[in-house]
Amino acid sequence: MKKILMVLTNSSKIDDEHETGLWLSEFAEPYAEFKNQGFVVDVASLKGGRIPLDANSLDDENVETWKGITKELDQTLVLSQLNVNEYSGIFLPGGHGTMFDLPDSTALQQALSHFAENHKAIGAVCHGPAGFVGTKLSNGKWLVDGISLTGFTNEEEQQTGLDSLMPFLLETKLREQGAQFEKSDAWSDHVITDGKFVTGQNPQSSQSTAEAFVKVV
């Protein structure tokens, strides 16, 4: 039975005035889809333990709907302690927290280069592609160089009002590292598949991204 590794952010704040974390639907919808399709799913983070949730992603309806799934966020595995050879795919949900801890993680960089160089599935949605930033392959090329992908756009970031608080703009940084960044209208469901790379633009794309991802795992 194939296994998928989901890697989440541990970051709980942007600054002293702005809390953040994981965007719940970007984890819950893909997690449910992967399980429904018969995959074994392990949930990890850089530090392990409980995952902070962005309060803006919570409402009574979705918290109740995903009650069973959110239990997976209480005690995540530590990424650096896992054997990436066991997994057929890696998937990075978003939330602004990802912008602050994923880009600098050596463990994540090593995992992503393993998946890329062994032609395994790599997926991400919204701010999840922040985890691609900083990752180079063994040949020295950026992970995203020449890859068609999408993610949270500069326009969408500006509309959140948080663009000035980000360490970088995701769309800009991915383009700088050679990605062929493809975007649709702000807040529209938009997914790009390029070989084993599957990415979604925003929270509205979570389900579609998960459905596209399982096709390449």
Image (spheres, grey):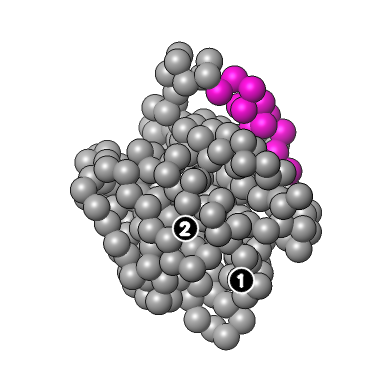
In this figure, what is the number of numbered marks? Answer: 2
Q: Earlier in the sequence, mark 2 or mark 1?
A: 1
Left or right, residue 199 beside residue 68: left
Tell me, for residue 198, which label it has, or none. 2
Q: Does the magenta run of residues contain 110?
A: no
Of 53 and 212, which appears nearest the observer?
212
Look at 23% across and 45% down and name the residue there. Answer: 186
Left or right, residue 88 beside residue 141: right
Of 62 and 130, which appears nearest the observer?
62
Q: Does the magenta run of residues contain 74?
A: yes
Q: Is residue 21 visible?
A: no
Residue 176 at what x, y percent from top left? Answer: 34, 72
Residue 4 at what x, y percent from top left? Answer: 66, 50
Q: CA distance from mark 2 to mark 1?
A: 13 Å
Quarter placement of the C terminus: bottom right
The boundaries of the magenta stretch are: 66-77
CB within 8 Å, label 2 to label 1: no
Dot 1 alpha-carbon crowd within 10 angstroms: few under 14, some 14 to 19, many 20 or more: some
Tell me, for residue 165, which label it has, or none. none
Q: Is residue 160 above or below residue 104?
A: above
Of 77 and 217, which appears nearest the observer?
217
Residue 14 at what x, y percent from top left? Answer: 43, 41
Of 29 and 59, which appears nearest the observer?
29
Look at 54% across and 83% down and name the residue there. Answer: 140
Callout 1: helix, strand or loop?
A: loop
Residue 118 at what x, y percent from top left? Answer: 65, 72
Q: Label 1 belongs to which residue?
A: 119
The amino acid pointed to by label 2 is Val
Look at 62% across and 41% down and name the residue there. Answer: 37
Dot 2 alpha-carbon crowd within 10 angstroms: few under 14, some 14 to 19, many 20 or more: many
